[in-house]
Image: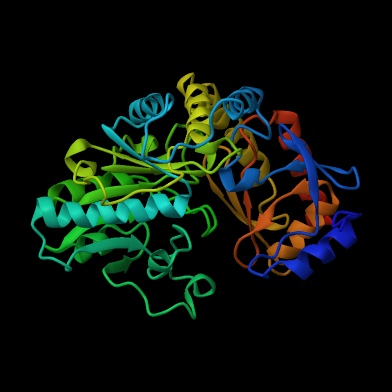
Amino acid sequence: MNLTGHTPEAVADAARWTAQNYHPLPVVIAAAEGSWVTDIDGKRYLDFLAGYSALNFGHRHPALIAAAHAQLDRLTLTSRAFLHDHFAEFCHRLAALTGQDLVVPMNTGAEAVETAIKISRKWGYRVKGVPIDRAKIIVAANNFHGRTTTIISFSTDAAARDDYGPYTPGFKIVAYGSLPALESAIDANTVAVLLEPIQGEAGVLVPPAGYLSGVRELCTANNVLLLADEIQSGLGRTGDTFAVDHEGVHPDMHIIGKALGGGIVPVSAVAGPASVVGVLRPGEHGSTFGGNPLACAVAIEVIKLLEKGEYQQRSAELGIHLHARLQSLVGNGLTAVRGRGLWAGIDIDPALMTGRQAAEALMHQGVLVKETHGSTLRLAPPLVITESEIDHAIDQLATVLSTA
């Protein structure tokens, strides 16, 4: 059965055969290169979402594709029952990139968050001396760390959380950006604070200046681990390697995913000091595909790209231009702009349209973005984008706003 056809037929086929847990835009992509994608009818679109930061280096980056092709011809999977010839290099390079000692390779971002939660609890019992089954992890309201049962147990988003109980205990939710709220929530059984340095799903919310460094100080003073979920914000997205770097903060665990796989394979990891990650022993945690040869081959090339600093610099410099262009639209269809580097959350005037309507209108103008909540759009173009391509996207946004 041919399920491709033209766009209307392909969209209908997808709706017929797929559970409706997503509400994709009615575009069917067949090819991509760099910052651009092409649908099955041959229409080109500027990708201004980049797979929610999974495609930081654009579609089909030549170095990443070459690494994947070369590895496919040799070895794709061993499981962790054996070592392979890329494993040590991947772990060593990622440890160096994060300034950590040890790495736990996984596949998806949610798996990496779950891994950090498990390590934190085990560290709390084995090292800190928290009574068994009393460990508490503090999280922020409006967080997004994944969609497993444990993770949605501490979500404040009804769409992600409702109807999936009973929920996993052991979490305390506090206001994001408030040091007093965090300080009052810490007690003797607190083992970790889990935060997104910039909240992505919530609309690219940047915390107040000094917040992250203040969290670091509170965690250090109370012998509590700081877990930085850099799955969306990391690997060059904000103009530095990690979003925590903007305040000179070194977390106890870096949680990494999305862009680490170069948009080719799912790769994630937790990196931390031996005094923390070293609590794991054989058989206590694992993943059949975590750290597989194909994943490591691609991720090594991703890390090499970041080691040069070029993409961090591009994000910082082009981010200034992006945000300046967006700020010029505040009062002209936009009510607010937030973000850092090549990452922005923009609020559409709700009197004009919803975020969904804006995303659909931009799609017809040849620019792909996605709404997040209400009238908010999340923008995350690939770091290979050019200034002229940014201008093209913002010009189309201005057109959509002016004709609403």
278, above or below 352, in the image: above
In which quadrant is the C terminus drawn?
Answer: bottom right
Task: Specify the color scheme.
Answer: rainbow
Q: Quadrant of residue 47?
A: top right
What residue lies at 13% left-to-right and 57% top-to-bottom?
Answer: 125
The spot of residue 46 in percent (x, y) is 76, 41
109, above or below 301, in the image: below
In this view, the residue in front, 213 or 32, is 32
Please indicate whether residue 96 sits to the left or right of residue 369 in the image. left
In this view, the residue in front, 156 or 103, is 103
The spot of residue 124 in percent (x, y) is 16, 55
Please indicate whether residue 274 sits to the left or right of residue 390 in the image. left
In this view, the residue in front, 235 or 371, is 235
What residue lies at 44% left-to-right and 25% top-to-bottom?
Answer: 86
Q: Is residue 269 visible?
A: yes
What residue lies at 20% left-to-right and 43% top-to-bottom?
Answer: 276
The spot of residue 152 in percent (x, y) is 43, 68
Q: Is residue 237 visible?
A: no
